[in-house]
Image: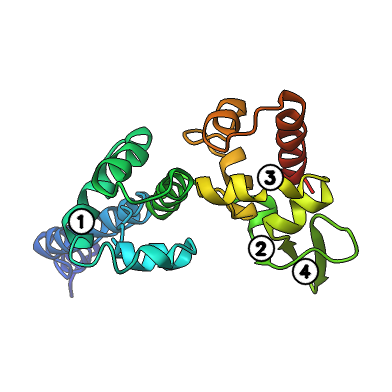
Amino acid sequence: MPNDTQRIEEKTTIVPPVQTTKQTELVAPVSTDFAIRLKSLSEPVPKVLTRRSLNVLLEEARLEEYEEKITGLSSRYTEQLYSLPAREVEGYIKKHFPFFKIGHARRLALKILEERGDYKRQGIFKYSKPSTMEEGQVIKKESFAEETYVKFPTLRDWLAFLKFPNYYQNFYDAGYEDYEYLIMMMCSEHYLLNDMIIKNDIKITDADHRNKILLRLYQGIFM
């Protein structure tokens, strides 16, 4: 009859040391792979920029009048416009598309910066909808559920509201006839609308009138 020592030896040999080693080898790779996957989830996903054509950007910036003129030139300059430093985009447009009005070149530059992610619409621009002024309101807000829609006036109506209807032609001739983009320029780091532009580009010589226009545009940001 086996004694106690023999029973212990028999129990000990039931699980060989080799099996323990194999279990360790199986666990280690799984743990490493899991750690790698966790690390990849924590890393930021690189931004992929979709380069849309200039024709599409012109339509969205309400500059369709230039589409025929840039036919055949769009693809040649698109890559460069997407890669230039922000401050150089407007100058590049003026150089290669000299038929653009001054304000239109700036508007397209701002649209390209927005497309590149260098300019972001915030606040009133989030749900903006163009419209004419109603009942003397410069900007009308309408709430639907949890969203607030902002209707912008036409520039002609806005200038009439300021008692400056005679300046509309100045804005139009210089290419600054879109009220929404005037507000966007007031929020732009690179293409800020200032007194010098209103004086030299839009040809408004009265300093008091320029100050009033700038003040009202600045107030329009926070309406």
Q: Which mark is residue 28?
A: 1
Q: Give me the C-alpha separation between circle 2 and circle 4.
A: 14 Å
Disc nearest the viewer among 1 and 3: 3
Mark before the other along the chain sequence, 2 or 1: 1
Residue closer to the observer: 22 or 122: 122
Q: Secondary structure at mark 3?
A: helix
Mark before the other along the chain sequence, 3 or 2: 2
Q: Please name the residue that numbered disc 3 is placed on.
A: 167
Q: Please name the residue that numbered disc 4 is placed on.
A: 146
Mark before the other along the chain sequence, 4 or 3: 4
**Type of residue at label 1?**
Ala
Badge 3 local density, few (<14 within 10 Å), some, or many (20+)? Answer: some
Say whether residue 129 is left or right of residue 121.
Answer: right
Q: Residue at x 85, y 66 (%)?
A: 134
Q: Give me the C-alpha separation between circle 2 and circle 1.
A: 55 Å
| Quarter of the image where one finds residue 37 | bottom left
